[in-house]
Image (cartoon, helix red, strand yellow):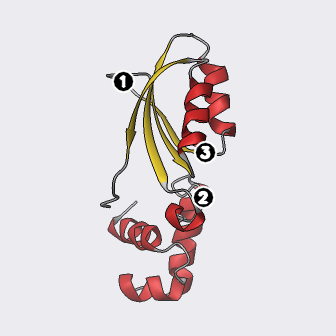
Amino acid sequence: MDQIDFKILELLKENSRKQWKEIGESVHMTGQAVGNRIHRMEEDGIIEKYTIIMNEMKIGKSIQAFVTVFMKTTNHTEFQQFLRNHPNVSEAHRVSGEGCYFLKASLSSQEELNKVLDEILKYGNYRVNLSIGKIV
C-alpha cells in the first residue's frame, strides 16, 4: 500500500460508483492503472465489499437507537447470530469497557424499538441512547 492506494480508497469511500478514469485524474494515473490497483486491493482483502448509505429517515426509519448490551448468558454465539439476522440492527460491535456489545438499530416506531429491546432481554440487560440528530 502506498499513498496512491490510500487516495484511491479515500475517493471510493466518498463514492464507490466513481469511474476509474475519474479517480485516475485525481491521482494522475490512467483508469486502467487505477482498476488494476483496485482489483489488487480486492484480492488482498483490503476492499471487502461495496455498499450504499441509506437515508433512514426517507424510508421511514425515524428512530436511531444505540444500545449497550450487558450479557447475562455466556451464549455469545447465539446472540451474535440473532444480531446478524435481525432486520433492524444495522451495526453490532463486541466492545471492551462498559457492556459487552454496542448496537445501532434503525426503527420506524417506538413499538418497534420496544419489540427489539424485549428480544434483547433474552440475552441480557441493556441501556438505550436515542439519536437526536446526525452530525457526520
Q: In the rendered structure, which disc, 2 or 3, sits on the residue that comes first in sequence?
A: 2
Q: In the rendered structure, which disc, 1 or 3, sits on the residue that comes first in sequence?
A: 3
- Mark 2 or mark 3, whichever is nearer to me: 3
Q: Quadrant of the N terminus?
A: bottom left
Q: Say which residue appears at 66% left-offset and 45% top-offset.
A: 87
Residue 120 lies left or right of residue 65; in this view the side is right
Q: Residue 102 in the image: state x and y as whole percent.
A: 44, 33
Q: CA distance from mark 2 to mark 3?
A: 21 Å
Q: Tag 2: Cα neighbours inside 10 Å, few (<14), some, or many (≥20)?
A: few
Residue type pointed to by label 2: Lys
Question: 102 or 96: which is nearer to us?
Answer: 102
Which residue matches tag 1? Answer: 96
Residue type pointed to by label 3: Asn
Q: Residue 79 in the image: state x and y as whole percent.
A: 62, 24
Query: Which circle marks residue 88 in the picture?
Result: 3
Q: Residue 84 in the image: state x and y as whole percent.
A: 65, 37
Height in image: 46 above or below 72? below
Which residue matches tag 2? Answer: 49
Q: Quadrant of residue 29?
A: bottom left
Q: CA distance from mark 2 to mark 1?
A: 27 Å
Q: Say which residue appears at 50% left-offset and 63% top-offset.
A: 57
Secondary element type, mark 3: loop
Q: CA distance from mark 1 to mark 3?
A: 23 Å
Q: In the rendered structure, which disc, 2 or 1, sits on the residue that comes first in sequence?
A: 2
Q: Quadrant of the C terminus?
A: bottom left
In contact (CB < 8 Å): disc 2 and disc 3? no
- Mark 1 or mark 3, whichever is nearer to me: 3
Question: 69 or 117: which is nearer to us?
Answer: 117
Height in image: 119 above or below 20? above
Height in image: 11 above or below 121? below
Query: Which circle marks residue 78 in the picture?
Result: none
